[in-house]
Amino acid sequence: MLKDITIGQYYPSGSAIHRLDPRVKLFGTILYIVTLFIAKNPVVYMLAAAFLFTCIGISRVPLKFIMRGLKSIIVIMAISLIFNLFMTDGRVLVSFWRFKITYEGIIQAIYMGLRLILLIMGSSVMTLTTTPNDLTDGMEKGLRFLKLIRIPVHEVAMMMSIALRFIPILMDETDKIMKAQSARGADFESGNFFKRVKSLVPILVPLFVSAIRRAYDLATAMEARCYRGGKGRTKMKPLRYKGRDGIAYLILFAYLGMIIASKILWNRFI
């Protein structure tokens, strides 16, 4: 299960999406998430799915690798589907005890499940095709207008970059600790839910100690390199837009236009 978490990992392939400016990928990911939340009909979801799978094909990241990330949200997805299925009012199809399943609840549960799947996969494409350093630079330069309202953009971007970078590291560390504890006789698979949760305590303590040690080493390394934040800091590889980035922006706005048009037409004729 730990190896199924793909957010924060980078998959090098040298594709056209890998070579895009990180600001384009950040904007595209935000725009894609927004379109998922305004989607209320099957045509919009089909367009969003087609756009996502086209991007995955261009990125040359294996689809199985991206699909692995969905295993980590199975519980959240199941809870969301159950709540939407049983808590939505409408035309009752099945009723038993205090529960009822409505037609609107089934449609809402299907839409919610598709939304979560596409959202996780779309976010994974950005992190899998963008290195943490590029992601930090893209966030800092793309959101620098927030400095006008005294938001420390560089510090926020740095924290998010470090957090994304630490996700796969901590997952590997957890896997090593679990294997070490299993070799000493620990059992993480048998027993009821509470027993399994209790068996995780011997994992959490060394994991927190390791995470604090890594954070301390990182802070020491940054201080030794005279890191003082973003003020007056220069870039070895400054971000500059290229022709392919302009084409990518045009494709993103065309996708947004198709989503809006399909939503308007669906509401008017259906």
Image (tube, helix red, strand yellow):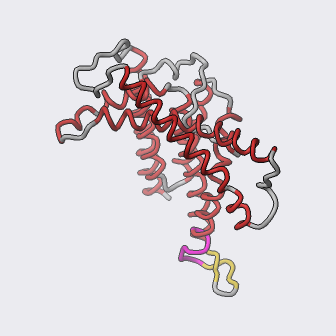
Q: Residue at x 61, y 46 (%)?
A: 206
Q: Nearer the viewer, residue 258 or 151?
A: 151
Using the rendered image of the protein, determine whether residue 34 is visible from the camera's viewpoint.
yes
Residue 156, relative to residue 42: is it above or below?
above
Return the x and y of residue 48 as percentages of the image width and height. Answer: 53, 42
Using the rendered image of the protein, determine whether residue 250 is visible from the camera's viewpoint.
no
Question: Horizontal placement of 232 versus 262: left or right?
Answer: left
Question: Horizontal placement of 75 versus 264: left or right?
Answer: right
Image quadrant assignment for residue 23: top left
Question: Horizontal placement of 257 versus 54: left or right?
Answer: left
Q: Residue at x 61, y 64 (%)?
A: 79
The residue stretch that appears in magenta: 84-91
Return the x and y of residue 44 as percentages of the image width and height. Answer: 51, 47
Residue 112, relative to residue 72: is it above or below?
below
Q: Nearer the viewer, residue 270 or 39?
A: 39
Residue 199, relative to residue 137: is it above or below?
below
Residue furthest left in the image: 148
Q: Residue at x 38, y 13 (%)?
A: 237
Return the x and y of residue 217 as percentages of the image width and height. Answer: 47, 30
